Amino acid sequence: MCLSALNPNTRAIVPGAPKVQQTTELQRPLQIPIHPQLLTLRTSQPTLEHHGTGYDLTNSVFSPDGRNFQVEYAVKAVENGGTSIGIRCKDGVVLAVEKIITSKLLKAGANKRIATIDRHVGAVSSGLVPDGRHFVSRARDEAASWRSTYKTPITTKDLASRMGGYLQAYTLYSSVRPFGITAIVAGWDSELELPVDGQVGSGPSIGSGGKVEGMTFGGPGLYMIEPSGMYWGYYGAATGKGRQTAKAELEKLDLAALKLSLQDGVKEAAKIIYVAHADNKDKEFELEMTWISNLDGPTKGRHQEVPKDILEEAENLAKKYLEGEDDEETKDDDKPAEGDKMEE
Amino acid sequence: MNHLPQAWGRPRDDIYGAYDSSYLQSHGPNQHTQQPIVTGTSVVALKFKDGVIIAADNLASYGSLARFTDVKRLRTFADTSVVGFGGDVSDMQYLDRLLTSLDTEEAYSSSGHTLNAHNLHTYLSKVFYKRRSDFNPLWNQILVAGLDGESKPFLASADLLGTTFSSPSLATGFGAHLAQPLLRKVAPDEEAAAKLSKEQALEAVKESMKVLFYRDARSLDNYSIAVITKDGIDLKENEKLEKQSWAFADQIRGYGTQIN
């Protein structure tokens, strides 16, 4: 259809050619039909400054060098969002977000950004807030449908897998756009054997279906899901504007050793959000934190907001740390070594 | 060969005659649950000055067979309520899952507000009433024990018909006949219940459980008991009836193998 619409004298140019090439000629990939209106737009405005080469105009299309531009633009949306982090501790998981205050008319503490997905799972995202809300809504549906099918809570890993698949589907069709968020999903899978919903008995103590001694179950889970649908499990995850700073701080914690306690994790999380915000000082922010402890811990395996007193204590420590860091910065240059010691 | 897939694997009409599918049709109206199958017996509960005590044994019977002996019939909700279930065990499991999803949905909003025992009882009684109005009842009698919106002791019952009832002491099933009079002696009205100490109330409930074990053939001497106060729920799920005395059994006439 497109081919026949072309002037036979027009020389087709392979897209992906450098944009310095000034041309009034058509730029179109050979195999991709382009709407005639689009062609006229391009030809009538030859000087139109555009970043891509036509491959970024719709979802689900590869560029010749194998990139999906729409997904990359979604990542840009994430990179401008408030910093979110998650820390996987030995006895729980912490989520924290730097909530940028966009107006003084907003009620302090309202408009939460971290959501409960199921009793034992929470999620936070950086990027477009409405996309994050839809992510949460879908994740809740997935968790509930898992419960109704298997009569057991969804594991953090399975939820991350389901949501990864969901986000990936939004890179495949031209009728949709990718999610403008990177989400961090945190959960605590019950360390008890067989946490079956509606279970009334305890089952046989020996024999078939009995107990295996020394067997362990559950534990902390932390996953980060990107607009492409890619997800990995992390010891510490960070996304949003301050992710580079936050990641650098997270790496200092040696989370892989799994020695950090949840109580200390909360303090570290507050500190990291404050440090990451230091590069973005002109905007005010609120720190929002939630946690999930093991069954013996403060939240008994449930996803809850960090209580006010603990949150305030962590914030005060974070502020104190920042002040100390500023002083050292101005006084001497040995700061990095000092800072490292303070992490221990 | 017959090219219609729905005929494959079926007796061939030309050999066996037309397939008789009459057994697949249901005649008359839809029939839902007509009777409970695996059942739990009584639940007893009593208010006292600081809270409520609720107890139920750990047995699930299949008819007269003591089928499951480790069944937990007390279920906690939101740190302030306990629901005790009598009647059909599978319906109890359904309600347990329903309450789990209710609790999950309550946790979505981070207002910190949770449903108290009063809210929970209202909700469950409406579930029961809806189901009996659909002619598909949930075959249970339940007691909801806990604290209401003003953190005062709350105790009420709901059953498969959607009937609700509230009293300082309550018992379902056989307990309504055997335990209720004993509990009423201890707490005839709200004023009397508001004067009861925890120890007095515990003694009365344990005594009721013992009498029920003596006289209810569908009961067990292993039981669960929960004390709900402002400090939270103290739930013990594997208690044993103490100081049983079967001396009275000699006096019983008219049952079993005895002749006179």
Image (cartoon, grey):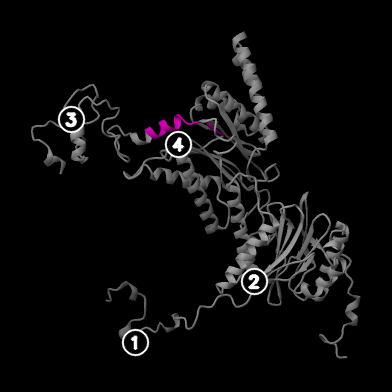
Image position, residue A211 (x, y; %) = 67, 55
Disc sitting over residue B160 in the figure? 2
Callout 3, which amino acid?
Ser
Residue B159 or residue A60, whichever sits in front: B159
Q: Is residue B122 left or right of residue B200?
A: left
Distance (Cα) linking label 1 and label 2 = 48 Å
Q: CA distance from mark 4 to mark 3?
A: 34 Å
Label 4 to label 2: alpha-carbon separation: 48 Å
Q: Residue at x 71, y 66 (%)?
A: B157
Task: Name the residue that disc number 3 marks.
Answer: A44
* Left or right of B92 on screen, residue A29: left
Q: Which residue is mark 4?
A: A128
Q: Position of residue A46 (x, y in %)?
A: 20, 26
Tell me the SS state at disc 2: loop
- Callout in the foreground (3, 1): 3
Query: How much space separates mark 3 and mark 1, taking CA atoms?
Result: 76 Å
Q: Amino acid at mark 2?
A: Leu
| Secondary structure category for the residue under label 3 | helix
Mark 2 to mark 3: distance in Å?
Answer: 75 Å
Callouts 1 and 2 on one subunit? yes
> Which class describes the residues within 10 Å of circle 1: few (<14), some (14-19), or many (20+)?
few
Lower position in the chain sequence, tag 1 or tag 2: 1
Dot 3 surroundings within 10 Å: few (below 14), some, or many (20 or more)? Answer: few
Protein chain holding label 2: B
x%, y% of residue B114? Answer: 65, 50
> Under tag 4, what secondary structure?
loop
Residue wearing tag 1: B17
CA gap, disc 1 and disc 4: 67 Å
Q: Which residues are magenta?
A: A73-86
- Chain letter for mark 3: A
Question: Is A80 colored magenta in this rendering?
Answer: yes
Tag 4: amino acid: Leu
